Amino acid sequence: MSSSRTVLSGDRFPRGTLIIVGLAAAVVVSTGMAAIRGILAPVLLTLVLTICAYPIRVRLQRRGASGAIGTGAVMLTVAGLLAAFVVVFAIAFGQFVAMLPTYSAQIDQALAGFSAWLSSIGVGSDEIHGVVTTLDPSKIAGVVSGLLGSVFSLTTSAVIVFTMIITMGADSAHAGTVLKQLSARRPELVDAIRDYSANVRRYMVVTTLLGVAQGTLNTITLLILHVPAALLWGLLSFLCSFIPNVGYFFAIAPPLAFGFLVGGWPTVIAIIVIYSVINAVVQSVIQPRVVGEAVSLSQTITFFSVLFWAVVIGPIGAILAIPLTLFGKAVLVDADQGVRWWAPVLGPTDETREITRTDGLAVKDARKHPATDDRAA
């Protein structure tokens, strides 16, 4: 008995064992989350929106408003944002389904030309028939209608969602007090949660504003190019701006298809060039400078997080990929001093950027003064 107690209390498990057990636990948790995605996805969306709306309560209370007014303001803000999201999403899909039949002749003509091109390069008739069948307008409309139906099925859980809005809004009254109580025992955890909340709010606000700008510019571009439903595709561009890396491809695909129907390849090339320039300026230049350390995730982690959360909780997971990944980082890494050294692996920190900049300056200096380096050697 004494030896077994020594093993359990004193000896540490091998690192490889801990990694395997941790990965297995992650798989079990992810599978469980996927099993309840119908409930979990809207709840997580409500949570992120509640975090973003919480400063409204703080500002109202600073101006002398009662706690009840602050709670009601948070609830109304979150409910309004969720309602706007669902309505916009439903209207966008509805307009797309209604618009498809009006361009059925152009789509059939384009499919005929595509079939002739496949035949000219040696593709068999059976394979051509299979490809053309999958691109048939009626089937596309059916798929989109199915997606629209899934959106409406999401609204059937409105009772759960709006109950969570009420409960989260009410619980937000005690958020500050709870954090003060926790700070006596786990100050690092409280600091990580506060930093996470501030970073998520900054990320969501900046992404929303830049998404509006990006959608507006894309809409103006499509109007100039006479692409049908330009406002719809601009709205799609705004929604996809919340999906890092891959959102651009979802946003550009429909305008390319309808641009080809009305203007041919010149319109397609113009859309690709203009969309690419706008996306590069907004996503690669402006957003990183404005957001800064709010999203301290590498590009690889960011791309993987989009795929991971989309698989686990569906399309909403792709939109919430950054906030959810940042929450995991805050709880598992930032809140624990013992594993905080992993932070640079997940994304460049201030120290990482400073070291990179210093090393770059050293390399440039060595190239400018090679003789000095030789004598020093």
Image: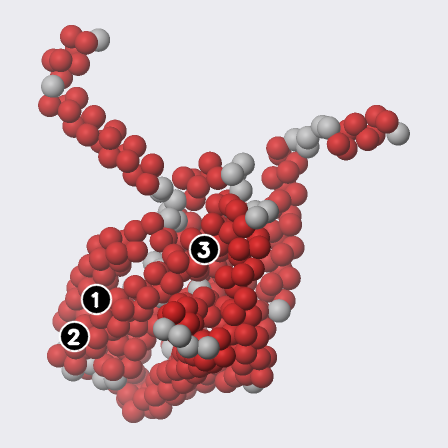
Does residue 324 lie above or below 191 as drawn? below
Q: Percent from the top left, x then y, of residue 307? A: 46, 58
**Looking at the image, can residue 131 be seen?**
no
Q: Amino acid at mark 3?
A: Arg
Does residue 150 lie above or below 345 as drawn? below
Q: Amino acid at mark 1?
A: Tyr
| Label 1 vs 3, first from the N-terminus | 3
Q: How is the image coloured?
A: secondary structure
Classed neighbour count for the residue bearing mark 1: other residues with Cα under 10 Å, few (<14), some (14–19), many (≥20): many
Give the residue displayed 27% in from the left and 53% down from the top: 288
Residue tagged 3: 194
Give the residue displayed 64% in from the left and 48% down from the top: 24
Secondary structure under badge 3?
Answer: helix
| Label 1 vs 2, first from the N-terminus | 2
* Mark-to-mark CA distance, 3 and 2: 40 Å
Residue tagged 2: 221
Q: Nearer the viewer, residue 236 or 194?
A: 194
* Mark-to-mark CA distance, 1 and 3: 36 Å
Extreme residue in the right direction = 1
Give the residue displayed 52% in from the left and 64% down from the top: 175
Secondary structure under badge 1?
Answer: helix
**Looking at the image, can residue 166 be seen?**
yes
Q: Percent from the top left, x then y, of residue 27? A: 61, 53
User: Relative to 121, is 371 on the left or the right?
Assistant: left
Secondary structure under badge 2?
Answer: helix
Mark 1 and mark 2 in contact? Answer it, CB < 8 Å.
yes
Residue tagged 1: 275
Does residue 58 lie above or below 11 as drawn? below
Nearer mark to the viewer, of 3 and 2: 3
Classed neighbour count for the residue bearing mark 3: other residues with Cα under 10 Å, few (<14), some (14–19), many (≥20): some
* Mark-to-mark CA distance, 1 and 2: 9 Å
User: Relative to 217, is 13 on the left or the right?
Assistant: right
